Amino acid sequence: MPPLLTPEPVANTRHSDGVPCLLFDQRFDSAIRVDLHFHSLVPDGVFCCAPAKARADFHHAGELTDAEVARTVRHIQRRVLRQLRRLGKLDDADAGAHW
């Protein structure tokens, strides 16, 4: 088990479009109260490095559109509802009433 006050990566993985991202948990707040929450680092662009170059170049991804944000919210909503159903915390009647 990782030390309680040292952030340890929960996942050092790749976003669905191949962008490296980092997620780690923090178990306590600044007053040392139990407060499990997560921090993530997802760059808003990509890093590219040619074989002969020593450093990578960053290419900005650009601004999100309202349609992209709406699509992301719908995707998160479906996944949260599906997980709540799997855990037995939400039935179909509840899902329709709240969403």
Image (spheres, rainbow, N blue to C red):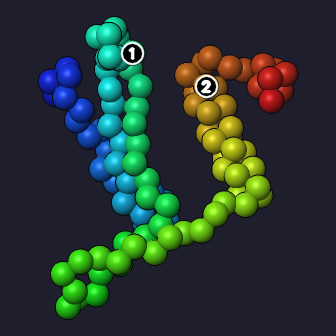
Q: Is residue 43 above or below residue 50?
A: above
Q: Is residue 22 visible?
A: yes
Please, which residue is most extreme toward the right here?
Answer: 97
**Which residue is at the front of the view, 86 or 50?**
50
Say the numbered circle drawn on residue 95.
Answer: none
Quadrant of the rendered structure where residue 29 is? top left
Q: What residue is drawn where x is 39% and y is 73%? A: 58
* Numbered disc 2: secondary structure: helix
Looking at the picture, which amino acid does disc 1 mark? Asp
Q: Is residue 51 above or below residue 37?
A: below
Q: What residue is drawn where x is 39% and y is 15%? A: 35
The crowd level at tag 2 (other Cα within 10 Å; few <14, some 14-19, many 20+) is some
* Numbered disc 1: secondary structure: strand
Residue indicated by mark 1: 35
Looking at the picture, which amino acid does disc 2 mark? Leu
Q: Is residue 71 visible?
A: no
Q: Tell me residue 85's x, y (percent).
A: 64, 26
Q: Tell me residue 53's x, y (percent).
A: 22, 86
Measure how far apart labels 1 and 2 are at the Cα level: 21 Å
Q: What residue is drawn where x is 66% and y is 50%? A: 72
Q: Tell me residue 24's x, y (percent).
A: 32, 37
Q: Is residue 94 above or below residue 23?
A: above
Quadrant (top left/top right/bottom left/bottom right) for the N terminus: top left
Please, which residue is most extreme toward the bottom here?
Answer: 52
Mark 1 and mark 2 lie on one chain; the one further toward the N terminus is 1
In this rendering, position of residue 54 left or right of residue 49: left
In this rendering, position of residue 67 left or right of residue 49: right
Residue indicated by mark 2: 84
